[in-house]
Every structure is written in structure tokens, then in C-alpha cells.
Amino acid sequence: MQLGKFSLGVGDRFSHQGEAQLRGIMKANSQGLEINPVWNKSNREHTYVHSHPADTRKEADAAVAALGYIGQYFVDADHINFSNVAPFVAHSDFFTLDVASFIGKESNPADIQAFISSCSKYVGKLQIPGFDHVLEVTPEMLEKIANKFLAATQQAADIYNFLKTEKGVGNFITEVSMDEVESPQTPLEMLFILKMLADKGVPAQTIAPKFTGRFNKGVDYKGDLKQFAKEFEEDVLVIDFAVKEFGLPEELKLSVHSGSDKFSIYPIMADVIKKHNKGLHVKTAGTTWLEEVIGLSVAGGEALDLAKQIYANSFNRSEELCAPYADVIEIDNSQLPSIDEVNAWTSEKFANTLRHIPGHADYNPNFRQLIHVAYKVASEMGDTYTGMLEKYADIIGNCVEENIYDRHLKRLFNL
């Protein structure tokens, strides 16, 4: 099983927007691209909305059947570990192995020494094709890298071997995720992380590193664009070198997590992958849930009232809702409108405040980020919320499709 050159992770908290998401991807594919849709949902999201991995599989299969889609598609067990992988096994064929919590954990000294010895040929000056500088590799540096990442890659191998036993070799896509940490991995660290994975027999097809800058949920990238461009291109070159040097899958490519709405870096990524003829996986996760709330506001009347109630409940519980996402959101509470103020808004005002159109006078990234983490509030509304999704499916679906195609894929692939 091989992931295509380009793939888009589409999260859908309430499993109602599969067709709309797929329409957006098919619209891009009709222009000569081949983007594989990957429906992704994490254990945390399932827990919050009381869904099951089987629901994601049903949604994906139903959307594909309804639209007559004939390309590859996948269902991603997103950010799984040993404690929660079991329920996903039967329903997923893409597994994001989240090993970030094992970075820096202690490894067996003998394993560390064995790794350092296996890297002896790289000690000294190392030239990665395409780099404008030579990398300096020392035994001390290798020891530091091993101490930092060996346990994490062993965890990836342990989960992979479990999945291999359960599903069979070649019957699933493996992604390794190390993005939810404080410090970005350097290109040199990335190189030896890939060697560790190869040594342990983990055939990763995508890897999600931590990049410099902020990848806050649902809003644009915050950081040094030049530094990001340098890191992204060097990671692409390191992967190309590692594939040839360590025998990793040829389709191995970068995965950008929290990739939704990172509009300022899309042109950078587009230029780099075109320059080097490489693939890319981008996860857009919660942006579809935001489009549902936008669609409700556009629908007006009772649907707008429900959108306003979601905000009111979110505003009153902001500390609770934000806590699990503290590392990936930045909300200035002083910039959040009051409940009374929002209750007086028109459909247009609510939608324009929430919709991510950079430079629009009404757009409020603080408002958007709070709603982004508040899907638990909608879940607690039960049939009241999902009933509205079904009643106003056409309006909401148009919002979802427009978001995927016009704001994401057109920017990512210069359509």
C-alpha cells in the first residue's frame, strides 16, 4: 500500500462533511493533480464527540461511493500510541504514530553505543546533496541525538510491529509524528531519526517534524518565513538523501500537521516541492468544524442562533476548552467579543468574524481559535447540533467545499 505523491488529511469532527470535503479534492484533481484524501480523526476527538473509528471509515466509504471517486483514499488513526491504537486497527489503513512524548526518554546504553558505531561512516564532514553548507558530524553529537530520539523511534517500531502483526505487512501507511514538542528538529537530527527508523524496520511513508514558528490551530503560521523556507527545503533534501542512503520507501515525504490555514507558508512549500519534484502531506483537521459553524451562521434564523449559543457556551468555558490545546493556540481574551455583542450580530458579521480571510476587517483570529477548540460544546448539544447539520447540509457543504478548494488547495498547488 503506497500513499500518493500528494495527500490531504481532512478531519471531520461530526462525520457529516465527507462528500463536501471530497468534492473539493476532486475539483483540484480535475485540473491534473492526484491528491489522495485521508480522513483523519484522533482518539481525543472520538472521545469528545462520542464517536468510534468505524464512523470515520463509514463516512469515507460513503463519500467515495456517492461521488464515484476512483482514486486512492485512506482513513488515518491520527496521533495514536500503544494505549489507544486497538480500536483503530480494524477500520484504519493509515496510522500516525505519535512518539513525541518519548523524545528524551532514557535508552539502553548498549543500544546507544550500537547506534553510534553504526554511524561511523558519517563522522566528519557530511555533504547532503543540495545543501549550501557542509554538516559536521561528531561522535558526541551522535550520542546526544541518540539520547534524545532513540527511545522515540523504538516506540514507533514497537507500534509498527504491533500493527504489522494485526494487519499484515504492506496493508497500511505509516506516518511518524514528532511535531508536538517545544523545539524543532534540526536537519541533522532528522537525518539520524530516519536512520533509526530504517534500522528498526519502520517503513515510514510520511514524517511530521516540528518546524520553527507557531502552528496554531486554524490560523496562519506565525514565525520567520525565511527560516521556515530554509528548514522545509533542507528537510526535503534530507529525506531524499535518507531514502537512497538507508533504503526507506521512495514515497517518503514531509507531513505538515496543523497545516490548515497556514496560508503564508503555502507558496513556500509549493515552490520547494515543485523545485525538487517531491510529495507533500498536509493535515487540515478542525477547519471543517469551523466551516460548519460558519455555514450555520450563513443559514440565519435558528441556525444562526445555534452558532451564537456555541460561542456563548465556549466563552463561559474557555479555560476548560483551551487547556488540552494550550501549546497550539494563542488567544488574547481581551480581543474576544462579549456574548451580548455577538448575540446582536447579523449572519454576515458572524461569518466574516469566524471565516479566515486575511485582511478582512471583521476577521478575528482569537474568536476563530476559541471556536476551533469548542467542538466539545457542540457535541454536548447532541441531536440539536447534528440535526441542524442535516437541515442545512447544502449551505454548510458549500462552505466546506469552498474552504478545502479555494482557500487550501488552490494556494498549495497554485491552481
Image: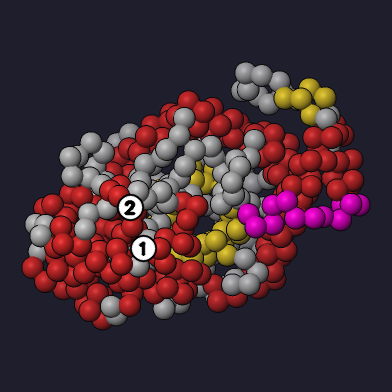
Residue 41 sits in quarter: bottom left
**Residue at figure coordinates x 11%, y 53% from the top left:** 348
Regarding residue 335, the answer to whether it shows in the image is yes
Q: Horizontal and vertical percent for residue 153?
A: 72, 53
Q: Horizontal and vertical percent for residue 307?
A: 20, 65
> Farthest front residue?
334
* 309 lies left or right of 219: left
Magenta extent? 100-111
Query: 78 or 413, which lies in front?
Result: 78
Read off the residue under disc 2: 333
Picture layout, residue 286 above or below residue 63 = above
Q: Amino acid at mark 2?
A: Asn
Is 107 one of the magenta-colored residues?
yes
**Residue at figure coordinates x 66%, y 19% from the top left:** 133
Query: 251 or 323, which lies in front?
Result: 323
Q: Residues within 10 Å of mark 1 (few under 14, many from 20)?
A: some
Query: 234 or 38, which lies in front?
Result: 234
Q: Horizontal and vertical percent for residue 305?
A: 14, 68
Considering the numbered disc 1 on the image, is that residue within a helix, a strand or a loop?
helix
* 336 lies left or right of 137: left
> Farthest bottom residue?
383
Asked whether disc 1 touches disc 2, contact meaning CB atoms under 8 Å apart, the reply is yes
The chosen color scheme is secondary structure
Regarding residue 14, the answer to whether it shows in the image is no
Q: Amino acid at mark 1?
A: Ser
